[in-house]
Amino acid sequence: MKKLLNTLFVTLQGASVVKEGENVVVREEGEVRLRVPVHGLGGLVCFGQVWCSPALLYLCAERGVGVSFLSENGKFLARVAGPVCGNVLLRREHYRWADDPGRSADVARNILTGKLANARNVLMRARRDHGDKTYEAALAKACGRLEDCLTRLPGADSLDVLRGIEGEGANVYFGIFDALITSKDPAFVFGGRNRRPPLDPVNCLLSFLYTLLTHDVRSALEGVGLDPAVGFLHRDRPGRPGLALDLMEELRPVLADRVAVSLINLGQLKARDFRQLESGAVLLSDDGRKEVLVAYQKRKQEDLMHPFLKERIPAGLLCHVQALLLARHIRGDLDGYPAFLWK
């Protein structure tokens, strides 16, 4: 259980959330684990096998506390809200911002700051851990180029310019990504990013992890009342969750790329965990997929320091915290969107 930004996240499986007077009470096997006054809550998010009493749902609806239900893995299932809530107003303001090139650029700039800074920090950590190896000079050069991209972001006044900087940064990052892989297995040589479909095991693994992360971010956005389909950096396209793709950019290096590298370098995935179709597409086997899911869930359980909140939180809540911060920015409660910067 974790209370962040006036939102209570209940992840304890088998827990019951009930009303006691003006309090929200979390119980496990009859024992009270947490008691929070309802007037101090802005939202309640329940993961997996968490039961909420009808009286509690009525109390939350009456007091304007939205209740979201997600699967244990973070897939959005449903949201319960009273007849008067801020979601409609929030979404209307969200749509106005998405239609405003200036505001869209402001949000996109902050998101890309997080993306490029986190990508650089992944490379810096690899340089520190493997500084005596062949790629040390190339890693140093790539870090410098990403730093240059970061210094140009504040002066980028349009989405097109921002996308150009993002593309340059992505080329630098994935151009050196093979240096992060220490496995000697030739199956895991990385020659560059490819997708739709992925044509090698590393790209297959990255694409699968990015899909998991997209689902988590989409659920988080649904939970706070934002429309996952309407992005700022990724523009509208039928069937594409533009805002989810926006928000996941800053989290990919932290929650996906490092998991992929660890799975390969620690030998948890082998060449036999992938299969190639006649079309050339590479897919994970059932056993390989299970291995990735276990590693991803373990990563989400690790604690990270959030620089804006100034407290440690489980990595799995990053999506929800960043969605909350974005919603607060759009509502006018925050002057800017504080991207997550990993160190």
Image (cartoon, rainbow, N blue to C red):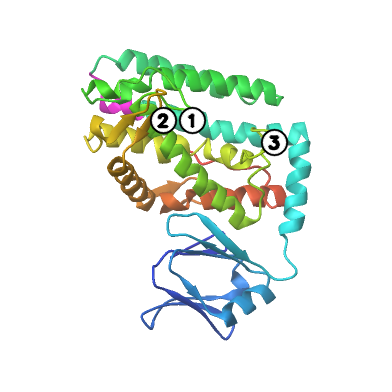
Kindly give the residue lying farthest to the front in the view shown: 278
Q: Earlier in the sequence, mark 1 or mark 3?
A: 1
Q: Nearer the viewer, mark 3 or mark 2?
A: 3
Quarter of the image holding residue 7?
bottom right
Residue annotated with mark 3:
236
Query: Residue 242 bears which disc, if any?
Result: none
Spatial separation of the CA atoms under disc 3 and disc 2: 31 Å
Quarter of the image where the C terminus is located: top left
In the image, is residue 131 part of the stretch drawn in magenta? Answer: yes
Provide the secondary structure element on which disc 2 rests: helix
Can you give x and y, in whole percent of width and height, for residue 109 in the image?
63, 31
Q: Amino acid at mark 3?
A: Asp
In the image, is residue 338 part of the stretch drawn in magenta? Answer: no
Query: Residue 117 bears which disc, if any?
Result: 1
Mark 1 residue crowding within 10 angstroms, few (<14) / some (14–19) / many (20+) = many
Can you give x and y, in whole percent of width and height, for residue 21 in the image?
57, 86
Provide the secondary structure element on which disc 1 rests: helix
Q: Which residues are magenta?
A: 125-132
Query: Residue 121 bears which disc, if any?
Result: 2
Can you give x and y, in whole percent of width and height, for residue 108 in the image?
64, 33
Asked if the residue at tag 2 contacts the one at tag 1, i.e. Cβ–Cβ closer than 8 Å, the answer is yes
Q: Amino acid at mark 1?
A: Ala
